[in-house]
Image (cartoon, rainbow, N blue to C red):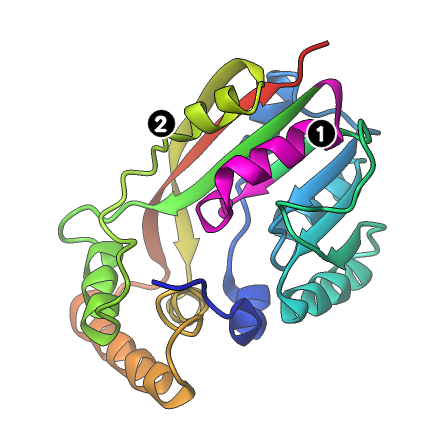
Amino acid sequence: MTNPDWSATSADYARHRQGFPPRFFEMIADHGLFAPGMRVLDLGTGTGVVARALAARGADVLGLDVAPGQIVEARRLAAEEGLAARFEEGFAERSGQPDDGFDLVVAAQCWHWFDRALAAAEARRVLKPGGALLICHHDWLPHPGTVAHATEFLIEAHNPRWRMGRGSGFYPAWADDLRLAGLGEIAFAGFDHEAVYPREAWRGRIRASAGVAGTLADDAVERFDAELAALLNARFPEEPLRIPHRVFAIWGRKPG
């Protein structure tokens, strides 16, 4: 599947896509990856979900994204929340940022969209000695019989090019990306949890995904959404929905 048009998803993305749970931010602080006052570069920031959360915790954050619609929404949300996080259009592989400028580089839910070798080398360049590149995911788990499992089958029926289902929420290959870029002290952590979605919000979250509004035409998105609504009514009538998720984080540090 080609890279999606994330600007086409921005409205639903901003409204319905949940961020990482608070435990994630406690976890990265406990591992010495984050502390208030750090300079943070958030690659593939989207609507600034992680960037805004880190800014709210005292970071000096710059978020980059190639999609102008995402940057518009990130700036709007940061302004509404009274946050000083900055957002600019830019590439993970060539950020335009100075050498040794950041304590932490984050890539959340996006590493697979990059040229991973170039993005890792760029992260190493802009990190201060001892700074870390943190790659993290917050993925639904498509256990058989669950809402996520049924939703994935529906996405595949409407978009046969989508090949991102059946995930486990683990990304061991990212360790090689870190190592080959010359980053050390590689480590990982994570946990499972239930994300709570009102039914309408789950539909919006799925519309905002790469396999739906990111790649399908507007009329096809409408047909998909109507079928998802019917599926939820028929098979998952509970309100709200409880969706198993896995948080996975892996990181490496720049020597020195």
Residue 40 drawn at (x, y percent): 75, 36
**CB under 8 Å between discs 1 and 2:** no
Q: Which residues are magenta?
A: 107-130
Q: Is residue 60 left or right of residue 219?
A: right
**To which quarter of the image does residue 152 belong?**
bottom left
Tell me the kind of residue under disc 2.
Pro
| Left or right of 117 in this view: 230 | left
The N terminus: image quadrant: bottom left
Quadrant (top left, top right, bottom left, bottom right) of the C terminus: top right
Please name which of the two marks, 1 or 2, marks the residue nearer to the observer: 1
- Point 21% across, 69% down: residue: 160
User: Residue 68 falls in which quadrant of the image?
Assistant: bottom right
Identify the residue shown where x is 72% and y is 69%: 72
Identify which residue, 63 or 161, lies in the foreground.
161
The residue that mark 2 highlights is 172
Q: Which residue is mark 1?
A: 125
Q: Amino acid at mark 1?
A: Arg
